[in-house]
Image (cartoon, helix red, strand yellow):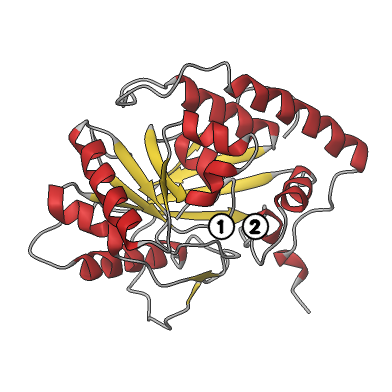
Amino acid sequence: MKNASHTSSRPLPRTIRGLRAFHVATHVVGCFLLPAAERPPSAKSRDALSLWCQRLLAKFGVEVTVEGALPGAGPFLIVSNHISWMDIPLIRHLFPAQFIAKEEISLWPVIGAGAKRAGTLFISREKLSSLHATLDQVCQSFGRGESVVLFPEGTTTTGEGLLPFRSGLFQSALRTGIPILPVALRYTTLAGHTNPAVSYTGGESFGRSFWRTLGEPRIIARLSLCQPIFPGKTSRKDLAAEARQAILSALSGRGSADRVSSILHCRPEASREAASPLTLPSPPLSGGSPIAL
């Protein structure tokens, strides 16, 4: 039996969830009124999509805490662990960047159209030619000064473990010399324990995950920004392993009430000193995507 401190608070009643769902739906419709993603997104000012994502998080009652220093001017290959569809607006509200997503998402109603509008790069995991084409697109994005977000686990987890990283697209950093920015994500309870209600895993339907997330009275999202990794004379597999270790160390740091396990049973490095958290206030709005590779 799980410790009670690891469980989330009592879910909101159906009427409150329904009201939240209405506010979220109207906000999602508003996404299609935004101008298409600019090229490159501005790193100095909050672009329209960043602000839209911030307001979406507010409608779900998400409180965002960022640990670590925001990097200087990019571009970067931003790599992160993957827990939920909520990861996308969470990262996008902080970084004006493109995402790499599974090809089938482009066919999803509403979400696929929104992902295309945001400039998402789609990849087929089954076709080597698709990987090569995506690698070229990522390098071209770097050449235009755009950062790109990659979820190298290739799927979502509950947040209590970290899967091996697929290394294919780390080649883009070697080819261009663009630094890698590892970002560790956690969704927690007030006590700092992993909040399992936010995860989207195990073949669960999007609708069920969405409805459960709407029922969370308060969601605390913690992003730990690790030190950038500068590619040198190394291999893409070494870069992937270094980025993975940085994220694993951040997730298992002293600021976590839970320890995050490595599926590879890697021993985490010594926890780095925790940076002072920067809490991003959400706008006072009522209430309160795609899975990427």
Looking at the rendered structure, the kind of residue marked 1 is Ile
Q: Tag 1's secondary structure? A: loop
Q: In this orientation, which residue lies closer to the viewer: 40 or 274?
A: 40
Left or right placement of residue 153 versus residue 289 in this view: left
Percent position of residue 87, x then y: 53, 47
Please give the label number shown on residue 83: 1
Q: In this orientation, which residue lies closer to the viewer: 230 or 281?
A: 230
Q: In this orientation, which residue lies closer to the viewer: 284 or 230?
A: 230
Q: In this orientation, which residue lies closer to the viewer: 99 or 89?
A: 99
Tell me: residue 265, above or below residue 97.
below
Q: Are discs 1 and 2 less than 8 Å apart at CB?
A: yes
Q: Which residue is mark 2?
A: 200
- Quadrant of the drawing holding the C terminus: bottom left
Percent position of residue 109, x then y: 65, 38
* Residue drawn at (23%, 64%) of the image: 239
Which tag, 1 or 2, sits closer to the chain's start?
A: 1
Percent position of residue 227, x then y: 27, 53
Tell me: residue 33, above or below residue 53.
above
Query: Is there any visible trace of residue 229 in the rendered image?
Result: no
Q: CA distance from mark 1 to mark 2?
A: 6 Å
Looking at the rendered structure, the kind of residue marked 2 is Tyr
Query: Is there any visible trace of residue 52 in the rendered image?
Result: yes
